[in-house]
Image (cartoon, grey):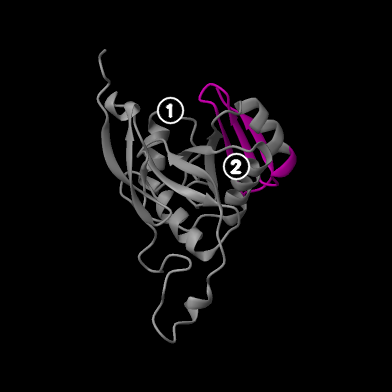
């Protein structure tokens, strides 16, 4: 009987390196690269230096889903509730994919993503777009990608995403009831856009 070769590699999950081994890797199926936690802060519950007030931060943080960047295949865990530590991780995760420029991400847009995960019980969120630099945004405009000159992505206010296992139409119907900003529907690409700009709706493709 022929055996399928199994390969393994390390990935960062929840602040620690774990070994991932599967037949999928042997078939060169992309596996998300988990980003390590921000070096600016210790892991929740980790020992801290004497006198450091952050040592009191020992509450259990429960991840509810995995965010995967479809362009870089990087991934981070989405927690059940927002925190300063998560905000820094998300800011880095949603950086401009061409020059790694970072920008603050609107909390309301991320909360729509989180709420949709909890509503549908989704375990994986594929992020199509987060922050865009002016250069990247203009490059997409020149390619005819239906990108606004002053896109909410440039302001750090928008997230384009899909939930694995949930149709784009189902996600749109839920987002329309929950979200209070801009909402765009991209059925051919299978994702929904949310931003914190003025309430408006559009359907591309």
User: Which quadrant: the C terminus?
Assistant: top right
Q: Earlier in the sequence, mark 2 or mark 1?
A: 1
Q: Nearer the viewer, residue 163 or 146?
A: 163
In magenta, the rendered stretch is 177-205
| Residue furthest front as drawn | 1
Q: Is residue 46 left or right of residue 184?
A: left
Residue 40 magenta: no
User: Which quadrant: the N terminus?
Assistant: top left
- Tag 2 near tag 1, CB within 8 Å: no
| Residue furthest top as drawn | 1
Residue 181 magenta: yes
The residue at which mark 1 appears reads as: 144
Q: Confirm whether residue 133 shows in the render.
A: yes
Q: CA distance from mark 2 to mark 1?
A: 20 Å
The percent position of residue 51, horizontal first and vertical second, equals: 44, 87
The residue at which mark 2 appears reads as: 194
Q: Nearer the viewer, residue 62 or 38?
A: 62
Q: Confirm whether residue 101 shows in the render.
A: no
Query: How many C-alpha atoms fall within 10 Å of the one at disc 1: few (<14), some, or many (≥20)?
Result: few
Quadrant hosting residue 88? bottom left
Identify the secondary structure beneath mark 2: strand
The percent position of residue 174, horizontal first and vertical second, equals: 70, 36
């Amino acid at each position: 009987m022929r055996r399928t070769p199994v390969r393994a590699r390390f990935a960062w999950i929840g602040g620690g390196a774990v070994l991932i081994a599967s037949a999928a890797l042997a078939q060169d199926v992309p596996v998300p690269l988990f980003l390590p936690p921000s070096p600016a802060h210790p892991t929740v519950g980790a020992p801290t230096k004497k006198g450091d007030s952050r040592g009191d931060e020992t509450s259990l943080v429960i991840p509810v889903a995995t965010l995967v960047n479809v362009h870089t295949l990087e991934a981070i865990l989405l927690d059940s509730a927002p925190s300063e530590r998560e905000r820094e991780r998300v800011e880095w995760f949603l950086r401009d994919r061409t020059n790694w420029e970072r920008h603050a991400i609107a909390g309301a847009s991320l909360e729509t993503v989180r709420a949709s995960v909890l509503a549908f019980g989704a375990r994986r969120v594929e992020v199509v777009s987060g922050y865009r630099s002016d250069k990247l945004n203009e490059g997409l405009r020149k390619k005819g990608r239906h990108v606004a000159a002053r896109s909410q992505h440039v302001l750090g206010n928008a997230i384009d995403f899909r939930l694995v296992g949930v149709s784009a139409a189902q996600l749109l119907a839920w987002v329309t009831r929950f979200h209070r900003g801009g909402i765009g529907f991209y059925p051919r690409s299978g994702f929904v856009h949310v931003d914190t700009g003025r309430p408006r709706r559009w359907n591309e493709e």
